[in-house]
Amino acid sequence: MASVELADTATEAAAGAPDSAVLVAAGGPIPGFDLYHDLVEGEDGADLDDAVLGTQMLYTSGTTGRPKGVYRSPELARAIAAAPAVNLYGYGEGSEDLHLCTGPLYHAAPLAFSLSLPLAFGVGVVLMDQWEAEESLRLIERHRVTHTHMVPTMFHRLLSLPTTFVRSTTCHRCGWSFTAPRRVPFR
């Protein structure tokens, strides 16, 4: 599955994986790929009789700086799916809460805390193509985002924006960071 914005990279990756069973393009055509819209258009949306729980392939460069994929076995995926979700963000039941995903979904933290967790509580997610302080505030205002998960550097950059860059963010109720200690106090 590849976004049309990454067509060159996707085509190169597909050439390196000649045994790929399915190549799917989203957002527009990529030569040699099926269009996502065309594939799902004829489906009726009913539950599958023989559904199989999928798993995730995470990315890491760890301490080596050499990129690699980390495979999670189906057994681990089942164990994670069976674990009760904890409402860390305090999402309101039946509310119009909305989560802004500020990081890449190939990373464990955004995948867990900005996609999987909100979806487990029926909360919609706004995805950013790439993080920029100004754009995050625009998206919070435009979509009335109530929750985010960011690393401390992102919070610092938000707080460092000039006061002339004003946006209405009164809808935003919760911003989490599960990483390094922050050096500046938040209000």
Image: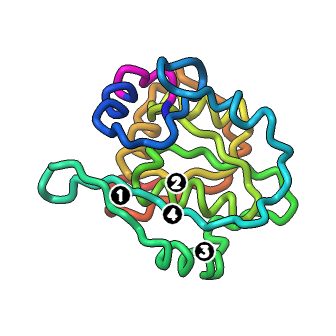
Q: Tell me if residue 187 comes above or below residue 141 in the rendering.
A: below
- Between the residue at mark 4 and the residue at mark 2, the CA separation in whole angstroms equals 22 Å
- The residue identified by callout 1 is 182
Question: In front: 128, or 21?
Answer: 21
Q: Which residues are magenta?
A: 3-9
Amino acid type, label 1 = Arg
Identify the mark at residue 55; answer none if there is no mark. Answer: 4
**Closer to viewer: mark 4 or mark 2:** 4
Residue 62's x, y, as percent? 21, 58
Element on which disc 3 rests: helix
The answer to which quarter of the image holds residue 142 is: top right
Q: Tell me if residue 39 comes above or below residue 60 in the rendering.
A: above
Residue 113 magenta-highlighted: no
- The residue identified by callout 3 is 81
- Between the residue at mark 1 and the residue at mark 4, the CA separation in whole angstroms equals 33 Å
- Between the residue at mark 3 and the residue at mark 4, the CA separation in whole angstroms equals 10 Å
- Between the residue at mark 2 and the residue at mark 1, the CA separation in whole angstroms equals 14 Å
**N-terminal label among 4 and 2:** 4
Q: Is residue 182 left or right of residue 91?
A: left
Amino acid type, label 4 = Thr
Count residues near mark 1 (Cα–Cα under 10 Å), then give few for <14, some for 14-19, many for 20+.
Answer: few
The residue that appears at 78% across and 65% down in the rendered structure is 49
Q: Please, what is the dominant secondary structure of the magenta stretch?
A: helix
- The residue identified by callout 2 is 149
The answer to which quarter of the image holds residue 179 is: bottom left
Q: Are marks 4 and 2 in contact (CB under 8 Å)?
A: no
